[in-house]
Structures are given as structure tokens and as C-alpha cells.
Image (spheres, grey):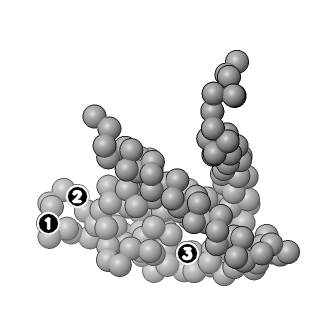
Amino acid sequence: MSNRKSQTSSGRAVTALIVEVFRLNGRLLAAGDALVADIGLTSARWQVLGAIAAAPTAETVARLARNMGVYRQGVQRIVNEMADEGLVEFLDNPHHRRAKLVTFSKRGRRAFDAADRLQKPWADALAAGLDAAGLVAATRVVSTLRQRLEENLKNSP
């Protein structure tokens, strides 16, 4: 049993936030899976397609994984499956012979756009009654914590 008195009030609040974010992540994955199931996606595939959409140019799997904050191997497996199903395509990389670039196929772009159309009213319904300024502040806190964790990882031996 931990001694909660040895932790600062901010530390306790961050711990509570982290636990809630873990719980939220599980619910988001389940809700995302349900939301996009009829268009042949999962939350994981949708997340990869979102990273492709957010990138200004075609990226390698390693770069997509870094941008998503996840392991390359998991993204590679998902990208390979989606390539087999015609959702993404590999392009030659002028900077690296073996590390191909990943981009949407026409089918993948349609699937991502369909998911986006489903997500917008879902997000609006989820946000109903919540203060937009509070959501912006919450996003800022979560983003700051993520950035600090990224810096800690960079500075770790």
C-alpha cells in the first residue's frame, strides 16, 4: 500500500487523471470499434489511417508510429494487413530503399472519409453539455503531460 501523504496534491491529481485516461482509452477503443465496424475498420486501423491523413506527405511506418506514440512493430502489422486488403499502398522512398512510404489507396481514402463522417456527429453528441473552453483546457493539460513524457523518454539512457 502506497503512502499517499508523501505525494503532492498535484501528483495525486495527475495520478487520478492518468487512471481516468487509461479507462477512457479502453472505452474509446471499444466505441471506435463499434462506430467503424460497418466500414471494415477497427480503432487501430482508423488510428493508422488518421496518422496517414495527418501527415503532410507519405511517411514510413516508423515515422507514422512515432507520430502516433506507439511501437513500430504494431503499426507495421496493421499497415501490412491493410495493404493486403487494399486500404493502403507502399511507395518507393527516395531516401531509403527498404523503408517504403505508406499512403492511402482509393479504397483506404474512402474508408477514412466514411469514418470521419461517422465521427463528427458522434463527437458532437459526446460533447453535448460540455463547455468548449473546459475541453480546450483539458486538451492542453493532456498534451503537456504527453510532451513531458516524450521528453523524459528522449532523455532516458
In front of the other: 10 or 148: 10
Q: Going by the image, does 39 lie left or right of 128?
A: left
Does residue 104 sit above or below 84 in this rendering? below
- Which of the marked residues, 3 or 1, is nearer the chain's N terminus? 1
Q: Are marks 2 and 1 in contact (CB under 8 Å)?
A: yes
Query: Would you call the spot at circle 3 few (<14 residues within 10 Å), some (14-19), or many (20 or more)?
Result: many
Q: Going by the image, does 148 lie left or right of 43?
A: left
Query: Would you call the spot at circle 1 few (<14 residues within 10 Å), some (14-19), or many (20 or more)?
Result: few
- CA distance separating discs 2 and 3: 24 Å
Residue sitting at x 14%, y 60%? 97
Does residue 113 sit above or below 94 in this rendering? below
Q: How far across and how far down the image is residue 63, in percent?
A: 32, 60
Residue sitting at x 61%, y 66%? 139
- CA distance separating discs 3 and 1: 28 Å
Residue at the far right in the pictured view = 129
Does residue 34 sit above or below 154 in this rendering? below
The residue indicated by pointer 2 is 99
Q: Amino acid at mark 1?
A: His
The residue indicated by pointer 1 is 95
Q: Are marks 2 and 3 in contact (CB under 8 Å)?
A: no
Residue sitting at x 15%, y 61%? 96
Query: Would you call the spot at circle 2 few (<14 residues within 10 Å), some (14-19), or many (20 or more)?
Result: some
Quadrant location of the N terminus in the rendered image: top right
